[in-house]
Amino acid sequence: MYTIKNKIFNISSEKEFIDLALKIFNFQLLNNTVYCNWVKMLKVNPDKVLTLEQIPFLPIEFFKTKKIISSPLSSETVEFTSSATTSQTPATHYVNDVLLYQRSFSNCFNLFYGLPADYCILALLPNYLQRNGSSLVYMCNQLINESTHPFSGFFLDNTDDLIFRINELKQTNQKVILIGVSYALIDLCEQGVKLNENFIVMETGGMKGTRKEMLKSELHNFLKHGFAVNSIHSEYGMTELLSQAYSKGDGEFESPPWMKFLIREIDDPLKIKTDGRTGGINVIDLANINSCSFIATKDLGKLNNNNKLELMGRYDYSDVRGCNLMIGNY
């Protein structure tokens, strides 16, 4: 497994990705009890899994009720949990090698944006800071530390301080990333804050029940107009994954070489779509080698001709044919 880990962040071709994904599939089949039972329940013969499209994807809901692990847990294990209301069960991702997570998000950030040290990073993540176990806070904290800029930091209720720093930064040539949850960025926008060409605004999604949900395009248009910027960037990640995809303002997400999206049929969740239309998003995240690298999310999306992902919304598995397989009594 050590050899496989070292190859994850050095993939340079489609063939290398496929070969490594199939090796990880077989590794997790042998070492992940939940995933193994899931594959057996689907009556999939592992010897006949020769392509990415033939790999079974684990419904993301299992992270709420099962320990999805492919390697033994230890005292060093970090538990990342999703946000949830009192009536919901949060998802838990058991990460027994947090350095692997650090390598994943650091390499990904460097790939799309360069070194964190080149930026001042302002993190507006109030609902994440108010609970423990957020993988997003963990990532942003590391990026803030690597930034080393004296104005970099998290902002919870200290909005006046944030606005002061923004106004000061506008007077310099310092590159700035303002990363925030959607509703917090809207709140800041409504206070009349204007930015300039120094700033990248990056939303991480989520109204968290504080505001009416908006289409991505509607949200971005609101923020562009309010902040007086030309584009809004986005980060697509989740508790159950150790890798992220980024959009630089066109609404289309690009993933790093060790992460790939496949689109499944809406009314047949075990079939991969090939027509370029909207379907359920399946994610292959090779950095998830110690949990499960093959996740069927509840997000809807489609792939364009450049294989970039466009998010289209969400759906509930219980609304589609085949839900007995996806959320059965397993």
Image: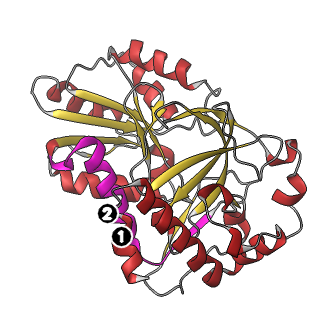
Report the residue marked by disc 1. 7
Mark 2: secondary structure: loop
Percent x, y for residue 140? 34, 52
Does the rendering let one see residue 318?
yes
**In-image side of 1 versus 165 (left or right):** right
Q: Is residue 109 magenta?
A: yes
Separation (CA) of disc 1 from disc 2: 5 Å
The majority secondary structure of the magenta stretch comes to helix
139, 97: nearer the viewer: 97
Percent x, y for residue 310? 55, 32
Q: What range is drawn magenta here?
A: 92-117
Residue appearing at x 65%, y 78% in the figure = 29
Residue type highlighted by circle 2: Asn
**In-image side of 169 versus 32 (left or right):** left
Residue appearing at x 64%, y 61% in the figure = 91
Report the residue marked by disc 2. 10
Q: Is residue 72 above or below residue 118?
A: below
Percent x, y for residue 302? 61, 34
Tags 1 and 2 touching, CB below 8 Å: yes
Q: Is residue 160 magenta?
A: no
Percent x, y for residue 154? 33, 47
